[in-house]
Amino acid sequence: MTSAELTSAAAFGALFSEAAESHPDHDALVFGSRRVSYRELNRLVGAAADRIEPGDLPFLVRIPPVADHESFLDTVATILAAFSVGRPLTLLDAALPDERVRIVTEAARAEVPGCTVLMFTSGSTGTPKAVRQGPQLWRQQVVELRGELALEPGATLVTALPISFGGGLEVAVTALLTGAALVPVDPRDDGVDGLVATLREHAEAQLHLSPHLLRALSAHPDAPAALTGVRLASTCGEAPDAVDVAALRAAAPHISFLNRAGSSEAGHLAFDLYPPDRALPEGTLVPGRIADGKTLLVRDEDGRPVRDGEVGRIEVVSPFLSLGYLVDGAPVDFPLDDDGARHYVLGDLGAVDGGRLRLAGRSDDAVKIRGYLVDVSEVLAAARRVPDVVDATVIARKGPDDRADLVAYLVPAPGVRPPSVAAVRAELARGLPDWMQPTHVVLLSELPRTERGKIDRKALPAPAARPAHRSPRTRTERLLAPIWEDLLGVPEIGLDDDFTALGGDSLTAVDLLGRLTESFGTRLTLPEVTAAGTLQALAAVIDGADDTEAFAPEVAELSGPAAVGRPIVVAFAGAGESAHAFLPLARRLPDHRVVGISAHGLERRGIPDYTVGRAVRRAVRQVRALAPHGPYRFVGHSIGGIIAMETARRLEADGETVDRVVCLDTVLDDALRRGSPICFPAPEGVRDTETPPDDVVGQTTAQKWRTRAELLSAGWWPRPAARQWALFHDLGRRTAVLHRLRPWDGPVTVVLAEGNDDPEQWWSLVAPRVRGVHRVSGDHTAMLRPPFVAVTADLVARALDPSLPE
């Protein structure tokens, strides 16, 4: 049957009947071991058609989970039957939020003449609208996709696209009207592991999924084996990046990749096939060759046509578009010209060059920065190239003054230390001119997504607002501002800008100390720099406005002057970490005054504490200097958790009270467990092995002695911050080996990071009154840094709340 013959609902029904009668024994749907033939599916479609009365009200079909095989099969049969009898159709996904269900259900009460699918936009920028897709659009969609996929009867299509949405329904209908086998997977229920398991069962298959899921699949350790039988992968829903396809090729070099772009209103817009030997461009992949039957007109802001290759607003002209919208129960049609073609203006900017489409971001993202029109997609491509970033998006936000700023949202890779905001800015600056660099960089544990898997732009958190700009005035302020701008990658630093709020972390602060010595000939401490906070305050410190030290160098006030009078929380840093690593945590504990304690000698010359006992004796003196009497509240990261508990033990022996201790990723296995009198059972399925006490495996004898000499001189000789902290990390591990871990019978809350395999029951041996053991995303250090610190801080705040029971 040709595309010209596919003009009615009856034609859709006839095409399915033809496929079913020609290939009755072919698989139509496959759910694991459950295989449904075309003969069986045809019988179910016929039975469903007999139950559906023709009418003008949309037939509301609720999509059950794929895991409910029989219900899902009946639903597919009902959808095909609705197509066949010409009943308007609305699909309701099981995962829809309540508000979306309300909108869809209300729309389904309106009269919609003719064979129409009522498809809803994703709602990423506003209230979702019902798009009326008629038979002409669907005729073109099915025939064209079948050709682009080179689809033949008997082919296998594994689809992880929900059939309740346009791209997923299109794949399903095209497969079943061709005589191919459809293998549906719902990663929302089964996860990437479920998709991997399904792919292992099929050879010579096609794979259809979102770019977001493609990234997760390519990174899966079993991806190479799972993708062995896949010949073609195709995405839709959002623009993929070249790095996504490169990752797919790394896992499965034989796969061809098809990028298909379109929208609910316009249907297909463009296709671009990347065989295994085709070179990949940099950045976001362009949609490619314009779809058949579509004419794209590109106009400037005044509606005038632009030259080939120039960016402008895109108008689609074609007889194969949606009919229009359904607004408040009434149809609103797209303009129709005398030739029978409809007109629709995309929400994206783009260019047409030699018959190929290139998109340049949404039109509402088209902003001028310092007089330049910014291509947001180019900024997004740069953000996705930042090392250890697995997902990203860039949008334009307009403030109250109508000035537009670019905001980059990045998701760090799991299991690695996330980059600091300052490091991200430095990386972006390598490839972008200054006027294209984002004003704000926000790290998130994941990007919010709609039920379709598209980025939910409305749910992206607003970046912290910078204070109104006040220009530096004094000589010191004017010299200091460009130093901050260089280190943080932020332009136009003002007097009230805050170093940490702009992305400065403890290592960046150490770099700042060196620059201050070079520029001003002054030697400040890290606590002085971070306590100052704003540019104006730090300039005052440099000018000698406050040249006193309230505490020893390793004791740092982290909450600022406004916290005076609040309950004190003492935070003990881990081995090789500055107390200032707690700054992001302290800022999320507004009801407390957080004071951090670093290892002696880490930041100022001094003899390190070579045993936990020495560190604890020093900590007791420091804690009593802060508050002579309890009750005390402690937080400890890594070995700092052990120091917190031992300090609590000493203080309680002196008659004081410690009513809260929170241990953040204190690792009991290996060094601490080795010398402990506590009997730790080996983790189930793991052979209990001893590791050498030295981290010198693989070193020569000379290298071992050099390492030991460096360790002995740690704290005495100044070194670059990264090396100094690495040495103190090794010292901390050796200190743990010498420590005899004993139970402490006080209230302890434990928060473990990703990658910590300690069994939770071990903590009942170390702390018999343990109040809870929680696990958070982010690795050992990442749990204290954005974006993961938000969850960590919430658990710490609850643990410190005296109103909650132990």
Image (spheres, grey):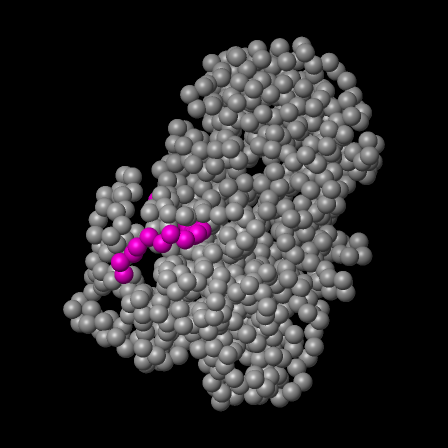
Residue 284, how many percent across, how many down? 55, 52
Count the numbered circles shown. 0
Asked which quadrant contains residue 605, the reply is bottom left
Where is residue 554? Give x, y as percent.
Answer: 43, 74
Residue 746 lies in the magenta-colored region? yes
Front-most of residues 426 and 534: 534
Q: Position of residue 274 (x, y in %)?
A: 49, 44
Residue 254 makes an appearance in the image? no
| Front residue of 674 and 591 | 591
**646 magenta-colored:** no
In which quadrant will I find the N terminus? Answer: top right
Q: Which SS type dominates the magenta stretch?
A: loop
Q: Nearer the viewer, residue 172 or 19?
A: 172
Residue name at image x 61 percent, y 75 percent: 534
| Residue 683 in sight in this render | yes
**Residue at horizontal 52%, vertical 77%?**
529
Q: Which residues are magenta?
A: 739-759
Left or right: 276 in relation to 691: right
- The residue closer to the viewer here, 603 or 24, is 603
